Amino acid sequence: MNPPADEPANGRAELRVDGPRLWRRIVELGEIGAIIGADGAHGCSRLALTDADRDGRDLVVGWMHDLGLVVAVDAIGNVIATRPGTDPTAPTVMTGSHIDTVVSGGRFDGNLGVLAGLEVVETLEQHGVQTAHPISVAFFTDEEGARFAPDMLGSLVFAGGLPLEEALDIVAVDDAARLGDELDRIGYLGALPCPTASAPHAYVELHIEQGPILEEEGITIGVVEGVQGISWTEVSIAGRSAHAGTTPLRLRRDAAYVAAEITTFVRRLAIEIGGSQVATVGRLDLRPDLVNVVAGSATLTVDLRNTDDAELGRAEAALSAEIDRLAGAEGVIATTRSLARYAPVDFDPSTVDLVEATARRLGHSTRRISSGAGHDAQMLARICPAAMIFTPSVAGLSHNIAEHTHPADVTAGADVLLQTLLSLAG
Ligand code: GLV
Ligand code: MN
Ligand code: MN
């Protein structure tokens, strides 16, 4: 049983993080792979297992050592830093997230959760607070899935959802590099066995909302009840390249046309299904990619998400039927490959309640919310009680260099994380 949030043990209820110290780390980590927009927006580009990811990892691992944590790297490159507890038999209470970003990402997505975890540890150190359970701060490999699909890859392997050898053999979408080779190249092919042999006592992750709801409603803390289902499909279309001026429409096998039809179809499909259904074509590659040549081939990705797994299945079936119909009508060959498929996840009700009660005790406005984005917490939920804390995203923007969360909200989220972890760690 978790201690009730309004009766914390040992009078530790007044402990608060040092917000400016956490902010300084966010800014410093954000310098690695920094992208500065024309309007002064400060984003980040640290695709998984690139040199920039390695540099970010090295900086965070340095901070982990500075805090006296026991740092371990596992066989998929997840980094787990642990502050021992007073009970040598107690399983760890884990927090964390990821520090890889999409190629045009922000400084907060993932990074906030990891650095807030370090801030919690530093606060405990500074005030000499011991916990019965150890507290671990982890960052998981390739959460974004932007370079190596699927997303949440490191935490998926950690939780036993994908065999390690299979994961190490995944190749990158951009340069066909093998994941295991890239891990080795950047020095993060670790010795700790993965999947983990010791499930955490609990896992709580702080993350930015990445959507508009909290800001629009003026709420400081989102109490995350679960994560919607995710389906990623890569569609490859083989048509025939031809002269753009001389080839009559009736003789074309136009891969670009079929790709464009799929793109507009998924938008109409999302509108028709309604509810939480969203649909995105985020990657579209045409070959030979020339102004006066009918495209001979196209590769595109379709990202479908829904909180209801049956509705998500309906969207997948409709997409598949439409691809077949379009391919037949245009005389192209379309093949599909699943890149990721995750069912919706519900977080542990008592840990969710604890987050909510803790946020309210600290005087913050709260709202129950479902996550539109995927998170490492949904993988940890397979092996231990898990929950998440959301902070507002300015203008609901994320996966955009203008991604921002106000310092006061960062501090509020980290305080809720601190007090929730204290309740769990005893
Ligand atoms: C992963 O972070 C996703 O939601 O795409
Ligand atoms: Mn994230
Ligand atoms: Mn992301």
Image (cartoon, helix red, strand yellow):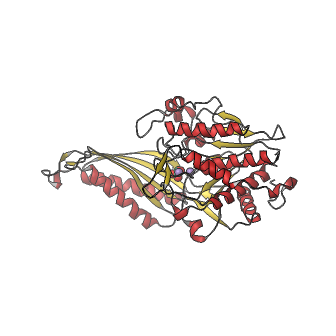
Classify 80 as above or below 378. Answer: above
| Foreground residue among 41 and 173 | 41
Q: Looking at the rendering, which quadrant does residue 15 occupy?
A: bottom right
The answer to whether one can see residue 138 in this image is yes
Q: Left or right: 3 with respect to 168?
A: right
Q: Where residue 231 sits in the image (x, y, percent)? A: 48, 51
| Foreground residue among 41 and 201 | 41
Residue in view at x 41 percent, y 63 percent = 269
Q: Left or right: 113 with respect to 316?
A: right
Classify 239 as above or below 181. Answer: below
Q: Residue furthest left?
A: 246
Residue in view at x 40 percent, y 36 percent = 175
Q: Where residue 405 sits in the image (x, y, percent)? A: 58, 59
Q: Left or right: 380 with respect to 106?
A: right
The answer to whether one can see residue 3 in this image is no
Q: Residue furthest right?
A: 10
- Counting every numbered tag in the picture gives 0
Q: Residue furthest bottom?
A: 217
Classify 10 as above or below 177. Answer: below
Q: Where residue 157 sits in the image (x, y, percent)? A: 59, 39
Q: Left or right: 366 with respect to 31?
A: right
Residue in view at x 55 percent, y 60 percent = 307
Q: Where residue 368 sits in the image (x, y, percent)? A: 65, 65
